[in-house]
Structure formats: structure tokens, C-alpha cells
Amino acid sequence: MCGIVGYVGRSEAAPILLDGLRRLEYRGYDSAGVAIVDGDHIETRKCAGRIAELGKLMAAKPPTGTYGISHTRWATHGKPTDQNAHPHFDASGKLALVHNGVIENYQALKDQLILDGDRNFSSETDTEVLAHLIGKLYDASASEAPAASNGNAAATLPNKKGRLVDAVRAALRQVIGTYGIALVHSDIPDFIVGARRGSPLVLGVGKDENFLASDVSAIVAHTRDAVYLNDFDVVAVERDKFEISSVAGEAGNYQLSKVEFTDADIKKGDYPHYMLKEIFEQPGSVRDAMRGRLSPEECTAKLGGLNMTPAQLRDVGRIVLTGCGTALHAGMIGEYLIEQLAQIPTEVEYASEFRHRNTPMTRDTLVFAISQSGETADTLGALRESRRKGYRTLGICNNVASTIARESDGGVYMHAGPEIGVAATKSFTSQVAILTTIGLLLGRMRHLSTSEGTRIIDALEALPAQIEEVLKLSDQIKAIAKKYASVPGMLFFGRQFNFPVALEAALKLKEITYLFAEGHPSAELKHGIIALVRPDLPSVFIAPDDAVFSKNVNNIEQVRARKGPVIAITSGKGAKHLAKIADDIVTIPNVPDYVSPILTVIPLQLLAYHLAVELGRDVDKPRNLAKSVTVE
């Protein structure tokens, strides 16, 4: 969601901060700003709109200084205006702060500050309240004993630095909500304080320079050495050192990690959009999701990261898959996969609902939390609720250093590489591939024969080449998109494994074209949805040549009888049959039903992409959306 970049070193901060913000544009935002300390004052530039507008402000009057903070805001409290853009200041104007997250009790804190005589608020944001609170506590500490006598982790810092860290801790102990923050003070040279709870923050470690960022992609051009902060960590950052402690004042533990990807990995290359690049990366990302995890010799999958013994896996009597958005749809396919391959009762829960309702669960329940970023607030909340209740909870995520990866009992990494496009594509197919390997592993422990295991492995290993065949259909799909560029929306239908694909296809269309779209089980057509069928509203049927093909054909006939246009995604002999009744057909390789979603979804990703381009949408930065939803 919102983005933070901080820098302290020997170089000019402005270009580093601005470049970092550009690298975070994909996260979604509506305003941007920087605060750079120049001598004894803070130079601020901020505005509503795109980072390009902020760049113009900075070019017109360049701020100078070698340390500062910057931010892209996705509005929660207050409209997206220049005034509400970050950074925000305390009452003295000497402390500047940027913030990701939500301060839930900001109004109570603000009311108390006003009662204490502080009425110098200039925005509608919760962030400004936190800046005022920290500033007030810092100023009040000036007359107290030096921090060195406090006996906490700040004792090793010189007086003003220790006082500022203490003020941050004291303020955060009063906060209810989530935060990732970075702040500077004009009285304290070459010094940045950061903290996190529920909103990611990473420390980048360089030579004679250090960085703070909400996402490592913002700083990977400068360093690949990183410390991923934990909840309740507070970090004091200087040019050549840093110190991590807790909100409670205890010394913090940390691990220096090497970032897996490089700066080149997060560039678009020759592609016009990240989304298209990532769609075309799926042969590799699906291959990497399975790499080293299939055992033809034993006709099964090997997933050591689950941290469970064979006996523990055999004892699993129920599985709950939880996630949000695209990850939820992958989980819905996982429900079909695990129940068919392993015959274990499996349920899918919206992460936002799971954490707030009392879901009945048995002792032998295993929970999987699915999230590309590993930082999704609702999914992280569901994971914590599951673990609090004593259930073994595993993660499926793409970021090996994410909060979900660190707080789960084990799991499976996707190894899909950076996904920059807001509309998830390769993460979906990677998640489905991983869920298929989980179904294979559990199935082979129960009832699947060696020959059945071999057939599943063969089907999985054939997928990368088959995806490449589907991607060759991009121009055909682009022509279909042009044909339907004037429609008000689309309906999507699928059965069994491909019903969740219909949901995912509708989500992709909504995300990047802003058109009306709905996904449904095909059989639900006659239970009310058929009332929507009309000549200007196409129906997209996911109808591969499988056991329910004839049922899909019957539904297509019903749409055609009411003059509704039909686009069909099919395979095998289905193409010949549907040529007589569908307006447009996309034919994919014929595969077993349990791997078909990985192929059927790709033409629909391309359809959404090409239609969005035809409509002139900003594909990689769709309105109102953020890549990683780190607030409720």
C-alpha cells in the first residue's frame, strides 16, 4: 500500500528518495512527498497526484541535504490533497514523519493534545497526530535526565538521539493500530528513526549509508543487504551504524539477509507494462514453484519447508485455506485439488472473516495462509488468530523474509520473483501449482497409487511448455479484446476446478478495466444470472474438454438463445463443438482437470490486459488499488 523510503549517508538524498518512490509506484498511492534536512531546517516538497508531479516540484526548487524521508500515500484518513500528503510535522516544525498504517485511536490522542494546548493541526490525517505526540514527548524530555541514565537500549545513543528514540517508544505505547514509520528531527543531524507494527519496514545496509523502506524493491539498486524488522521493533539509523530495540526498550535481535532478486529483476525490460511482463514470465515462475519438489522416483512431492513429519501429515484430518483476493481464488482451486487428490475435507475462508468469527475447527486441522507479499494485513491477522488457538499454521508466500513467512510454523515459498503489477498474475499460477503439489503429497500418503502419482507429476512437468503455447495466443486474444472494447462489462462462467478461475478472471477485468464483471458457477446461470444476458454483455465460458463439458455447452446454448455473445476458453475436441455456437474461441492444450486452471486463467489474464490497454487504462497503476493491502 503506502510507500516509505528513507536515506542517511554522504550522497544527496533527493535523487535517492525520488528514485525509491518511483520504484514503489506499483503499490498504489494518491499523493507523494519528501522531507530532507538541510542544516538546521527541513525542506519539504509534497503534493497530491503522481510522483511525476512531485519530481517537478523538486526540480523547480531542489532540496539539498544528505538525509531525509519520503512517502507515497494511499488515503485512509482525509482526502488525497496537498495538505494531507506526507510528511507531517510536529507542533515545533522540527520533526517530520511519514507513516503507513492506521492509528485507530488517533481522535482520542488528538483530543488530549488539544486539551493540553496543542491546536496547531493542519491536516485531516491520523499521521499528523502521531507526529505531534512524538514531538511533544521529545520536547518534554529536554528537562529530564539524559537518556544514558535510563537503563534501556537507547542508553548507548547520545542524549538527543536517545531522547528521540525514547519519545518514539513512549508515543507508540499509546497507539492502537498499525504503523510503519520513519522520522527525522532538524536538531539531530544524520539520524533517522523507524518503527513497525503490522506494516512492513526494512533496513537497507550500505557502506557509509543506510536506508529505510517499506519494500526492499525501493532500495535494491543501492544495496542487497537488508534487515527485515519485526513488529514492535524500533530502529535508530545513522550513516555508518544502526541500533534495533523494541518499543518496550529492550535490545532487539535481528538477522542480516541477502535480497534474492536484483535491480534488473524489477525492471520492465522490453515490455510496455509490468503486468504483461509477468504474464509472460509464467512458464518460468510455474517451473520454479515446482523446482526440486517433485520426486518421480517416489511418485510424490517433497515439501520439507512444511516442517511436518510424515506421521503428522498423515494425521491431518481437515485443512483450512485462507487468503484475500487472488490468493483466495487460488485457495478455492486448492480446495478442489486437495479434496480430489487427497480426500481430505478442505475449506476456504476469507482471511478478513476468519480472524473475526469463531470458525469451528477440530484438533487435526491444518491451516494454510496464502499471500503473495506475505504482508497482507487480513491474512496475517488470520494466521495469528489460528496460531493463537493452537493450530499448526503454514504459509504460502513469495517473500522469504515477509512477516507471514517468519511467523508461520512452516510453509512453501513460491520463488516467483518480484511481482510489480498490481493485478496479480504469476503469483496466482504459482500458488495453484504449489497447492497441486500439496494435494499430491497428501494424496500419496493416503490412497493415490504410484501410477496415479506419476501421471500427476507428468502433468505438472508438462505445464511450462504448455503455458508457452498459450502465450502464443496473445495476438488472437488482443483481437478479441478490440472487438469487445465498447461493452459495459462481462460475465464469466466455469465449473468445478474452473469456477474459481471465473472469479479470478472477473477480478482481473474489474481491477484494470473498471468494467462491470462477475464470476459464477456455470450451473447458476439459470438461477437468476440469466436475467443479465443481453446482446451487449458478453459471457465468457471456461469450458475445457472435461467431464462437465456437455453441461457447459448446455449453458452456452441458453445464453445464445437470448442473443448473448459468447467467448469460450476450451481444449481438445471442445473447439470443434463450440465453433458452431460460440462467437469467439480460444483453444488451449488438453490437460487433466486438476491442472487446467493454470492454463485456462492465462487467456483471461491476457483478455483483461489487452482490453485495459484498448480502453487507455493505466494497467500497472489502476485507480484506488494497492499491490499489498497492509491496512484493513
Image: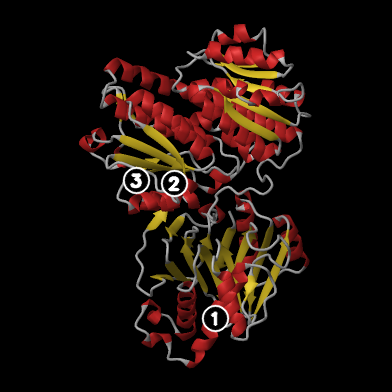
Which percent across, then down, holds residue 486?
79, 29
What residue is shown with label 2? Answer: 354
Picture layout, residue 605 above or below residue 200: above
Between disc 1 and disc 2, the foreground one is 2
**Residue 481 sits in which quadrant?**
top right
Three-letter code for the amino acid on which mark 1 is drawn: Ile
Secondary element at image label 3: strand
Q: Residue at x 70, y 39 (%)?
A: 514
**Residue 605 sits in which quadrant?**
top right
Which percent across, then down, holds residue 275?
62, 38
Query: Circle 1: is it few (<14), some (14-19), or many (20+) Cα within 10 Å?
Result: some
Three-letter code for the amino acid on which mark 2 is drawn: Phe
What residue is shown with label 1? Answer: 188
Which percent across, then down, holds residue 454?
33, 18
Label 1 to label 2, Cα distance in Å?
45 Å
Dot 2 or dot 3, earlier in sequence: 2
Q: Residue at x 70, y 56 (%)?
A: 51
**Residue 272 sits in which quadrant?**
top right
Three-letter code for the amino acid on which mark 3 is drawn: Thr
Rendered image: mark on residue 281 = none
Label 2 to label 3, Cα distance in Å?
13 Å
Secondary element at image label 2: helix
Label 3 to label 1, Cα distance in Å?
44 Å
Which percent across, then down, holds residue 162?
45, 81
Quadrant of the drawing holding the C terminus: bottom right
Query: Circle 2: is it few (<14), some (14-19), or many (20+) Cα within 10 Å?
Result: many
Between disc 3 and disc 1, the foreground one is 3
Rendered image: mark on residue 393 = 3
Q: Is residue 130 visible in the rendered structure shown here?
A: no
Give the mark count: 3
Dot 1 or dot 2, earlier in sequence: 1
